[in-house]
Amino acid sequence: MPLLALHGVHKSFGAVKVTDGISLAVEPGETLGILGPNGAGKTTLFNLISGDLRADGGRIEYEGRDVGALPPHQRCRGGIGRSYQVPQPFGAMSVFENLVTAACFGGGQREREAWATAVEVLEQTGLAPHANRPAGGLTLLNRKRLELARALATRPKLLLLDEIAGGLTEPEAKQLVEELKRIKARGVTMIWIEHVVHALLAIADRLFVINFGQKLAEGEPRAVMANPEVRRVYMGMEA
């Protein structure tokens, strides 16, 4: 049984169809990469999965259960964690406090359990040396790490990553990819929206390409990237 399955999901803003009948399935332990030009509807798709937006039609199933009517906090406590494209930590709080907050309020953990989770996640993401620093003073790489760490602190089964490598230098993106590989090795299922294609290709088992809210292509990563229509739409290259 897929961990997540979308069946003909629709979302419109006025006359604009942002998500137009999207269907996909993600198996436990799989990493699905999502590509598409700006405005294709990728982040809207995440908002529908996480509950930040309510779908106009179709079904969203998580662990075989229709979660379309559940609010975001219930989906999070059920195991759907996510990062956001623009990190927005509690800037005046320390890195450690940010993680304890995520574990308690996002993951529903008791305070002492949340402390242990925070320590574990600090080590996993390379943030241990910055544990007591105010989150607002971190570098971009460490803000991205903290965004990832806050999602991990909720102990997700499904991790939604929204352009987490965006804005990073190539060496920084490589560091982040290595951290994501370790998370994948622990069995966490991931869906990753990313424009840094080489980072995505290093970890994705499968690609799903969206254009104008519809599926353009799906399949093995390098086969999808060789698809003439994907090259034309996404990379502006004529076949």
Image (cartoon, rainbow, N blue to C red):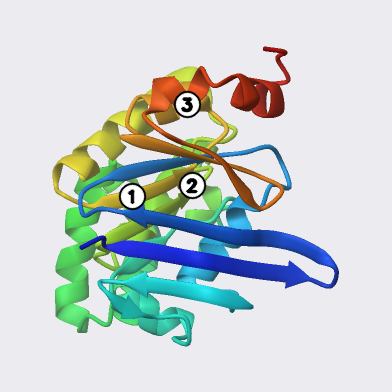
Q: Return the x and y of residue 220 as percentages of the image width and height.
A: 36, 29
Gap between marks 2 and 3, in whole Å? 31 Å
Q: Which residue is mark 2?
A: 143
User: Is tag 1's residue or tag 3's residue first in the polypeptide sequence?
Assistant: 1
Q: Is residue 108 left or right of residue 235?
A: left
The reply to whether residue 172 is visible in this rendering is: no
Q: Return the x and y of residue 90 as percentages of the image width and height.
A: 51, 66
Q: Is residue 217 above or below residue 87?
A: above
* Three-letter residue code for mark 2: Arg
Residue at (19, 58) in percent of width and height: 119
Q: Is residue 125 above or below residue 99?
A: above
In front: mark 2 or mark 1?
1
Please count the marks in the image. 3
User: Is tag 2's residue or tag 1's residue first in the polypeptide sequence?
Assistant: 2
Q: Which residue is mark 1?
A: 190
Q: Secondary structure at mark 3?
A: helix
Image quarter (top left, top right, bottom left or bottom right) of the N terminus: bottom left
In front: mark 1 or mark 3?
3
Q: Is residue 166 left or right of residue 219?
A: right
